[in-house]
Amino acid sequence: MAFIRTEDRDGVRIITLDNPPVNSLSFALSGELLPIVEAATADAGVKAVVFTGANGIFSAGADINDFSIEPTPETRTIRDVIAAVERSDKIFVAAIEKNALGGGLELSLACDYRVADAKARVGLPEIKLGLLPGAGGTQRLPRLVGAQDALDMMLKGRNVKMDEAKEKGIVDEVVEGNVLDAVVKLAQSAPPKRRISARKVELGKGITPQAEPFVVSQAHKMVPPENNGGLAAHKLIDAVEAAFELPFAFGLAREARLFEELARSQPSFALRHVFFAERELAKIPGLPAAKPLEVKKAGVIGAGTMGTGIAITFAQAGIPVTVIDSNEEAVEKAKQTVFGMFMYQVQKGRMTQEDAWKLGQSIQFTHEYEELADADVVVEAVFENMDVKKDVFKKLDTIVKPEGILASNTSTLDIDEMASVTKRPDKFIGLHFFVPANIMPLLEIVRGKDTSPETIATAFKLGKTLKKTAVLSANAFGFIGNRMVFDYAKAAGELAEEGISPARIDAIAKKFGFPMGPFAMGDLSGIDVAWHIAKARPDIAKGRTNVIDRLVEMKRLGQKTMAGYFKYDKAVGKGREPIADPEIEALFAEEAKKAGITPREVSDREILDRLTFALINRGAYLLEEGVALRPGDIDIVYVYGYGFPPHHGGPMWYADEVGVKHVYDRVREFGWEPAPLLKEIAERGGTFADYKQGELVHA
Ligand code: CAA
């Protein structure tokens, strides 16, 4: 297959990268490109060489799939191509459209000049894959923009827009019209040769070279520990340090060695899994192709925290939204939240006052349901009670135009039961946002038994417009995320009943990489919420003891009442920092005694296993029941919605990391009922990564 096209224009050789959809610089492409670059170098008729990309994009970098392939002596990589560019005496220019990322930017950094379209973005996002830029980026970018700015860009994996890229000198020219024409013109003007590799590395404007050890040691201090999500960051800093200390060629060799180490590291495999799992989400096996409806106007029922957050999300995506609530007090509070939110964006310089005003105006509050007659989608976000929700939908069904989609933001309840009170169950769906809805990236799309392919397609498209990562779940209590969290919370509660302090359990979860532990999470979402759920479905969510009832009696409802499993103090971390409370340990002990549970010594390992394996076991049930489509879907829910450390790839990926057989054995040791799918994979020595939907053959 041909990945490269060439064309000559008056002494300029135009080399077009053509590997749809994103012109990834695969081994195969590089193998084809290398002799083409060498031929251009050897051709006396060629004055200059231009790299450009087909498909409206320069290149998204190396092919991420290739990192899992063992190269052979014949393998050529983008590194070999870049070395050939570096050796050449010709002038090289990159014509950048849309994206030059990773290896794509690295190829253009090896060129003498870079010209980009005004809407393009450039960046070295490898850190997000647990890697470092491995084709000269860590050596060239610091020489171009200064080590400090280069570190900032690479450690955050930040893709920069053209105003910043031009200002920093990453691109030389930004054009509004045809980039290729501008590049050919530049190439023909016989500009001087400029190799970035020939420059000296500087720290940054106004920083003396003596500060280098300080900058490097500070950078190491600012990133997570090597064994907990920071492996790639530390190696990246090491590579930039090499740019200071070693001649260019040696720096490149150091970078290559560090890159290879990372490409084989467990966190990078996990992060690459997250990357691809995210791109699988909208591919729904067996779903007939359907054209999504356009959402031009939205409605939200309920001006509480959730409803307000959802309304802000719509407004930010450019969709005008009407919020219905008859409670004046709630509406007043919501208006203040909206105002505060947009003012904050203005203060941070992310938005002009005028834009903030316009966005604020695109959210209307009213108590008239009739205002929603022409809404394309209405999201209900009222109190978590089936009867209340049914009343809302009965009313909406008579008012909203027949083609409008009705959605519930319920976090647990039955979508089909709600749909049954409407005459449009095909246009009924769950859209489960996470608090705060305007910040949290996850959206669970819940498919009812009658939801049409068109409605599902619209929900996915809407998710993309709202900049959410959308995962499809079947209609089952708690869907994917919350159904699993009940088991996780139960596992945490049982540990506390056995005499382990909530503070120790939370500390172990945090050490593993969760941003907060299960008890702090319970306090944040509200003990009353957990109480209601346990009352509604004791079979699923009730623990062994009555600790939750006691907490509710004591009015310890979590962070909002400054006491729950922990205490909170306004003077400590703005009232959000959990403070261990011996009273709660005593409460667990008392309730455990009543229930006949004896305290015991539990190791840190067991604590972590019980928390994480509870998630895995339930995840296996959900796969088998068809609630979740793929292990990767569950992983995305947990990474984006519940803070599961991405460097462990999500619970199902983590099961493969520690061994499914090991998880299965431990689940049995803990006295839990192992999911049949867990048993089946464990017994045949398989992995969740190899799992195919519907694979389990039930006995
Ligand atoms: N390698 C392999 N496949 C890639 C890819 C890459 N670098 N980038 C994107 N793709 C694939 C996606 O998997 C997806 O495939 P499917 O259609 O089969 O699902 C397809 O291209 C389209 O991708 P998106 O759905 O993400 O499209 P988008 O328009 O929303 O986003 C993008 C485009 C911004 C380029 C985004 O895909 C992206 O961020 N890609 C990754 C960029 C990256 O991390 N580059 C660094 C690579 S590592 C490297 O280059 C190392 C080095 O130093 C040499």
Image (tube, grey):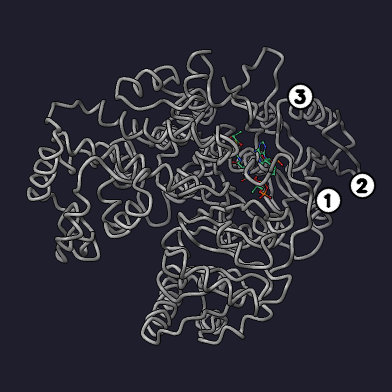
CB within 8 Å, label 1 to label 2: yes
Compared with residue 382, is residue 59 higher up or lower down, i.e. above or below?
above
Q: Residue 153 carries which label?
A: none
- The residue lying at 70 percent from left, 22 percent from top is 76
Residues packed near mark 1 inside 10 Å, few (<14), some (14 to 19) or many (20 plus): some
Ligand 1 contact, mark 3 (Cβ < 8 Å)? no
Would the CB of label 2 be found within 8 Å of ligand 1?
no
Question: Of residues 221 and 493, which is closer to you in this image?
Answer: 493
Q: Tag 1's secondary structure?
A: helix
Q: Which residue, given by chain and number where applicable, does mark 3 sit on?
A: 31
Q: Distance between the residues labelled 1 and 3?
A: 28 Å
Check the image and report above or below for 512 versus 465. Answer: above
- First in sequence: mark 1 or mark 2? 2
Amino acid type shown at disc 1: Gln
Place of residue 348 in the rendered image (x, y in percent of width and height, measured from the top left):
42, 71
**Looking at this view, is 198 or 476 the one in front?**
476
Amino acid on which disc 2 is placed: Asp
Front residue of 691/538: it is 538
In terms of image quarters, where does ligand 1 lie? top right
Numbered label attached to residue 188: 1
How far apart marks 1 and 2 lie (CA) works out to: 8 Å
CA gap between label 2 and label 3 equals 27 Å
**Residue at the image position 58 percent from the left and 73 percent from the top:** 394
**In this image, 453 relative to 308: left or right?**
right
The quarter of the picture where the N terminus appears is top right
Q: Which of marks 1 and 3 is nearer the N terminus?
A: 3
Give the mark toward the camera: 1 or 3. Answer: 3
Crowd rating for badge 3 (residues with CA inside 10 Å; few <14, some 14–19, many 20+): some
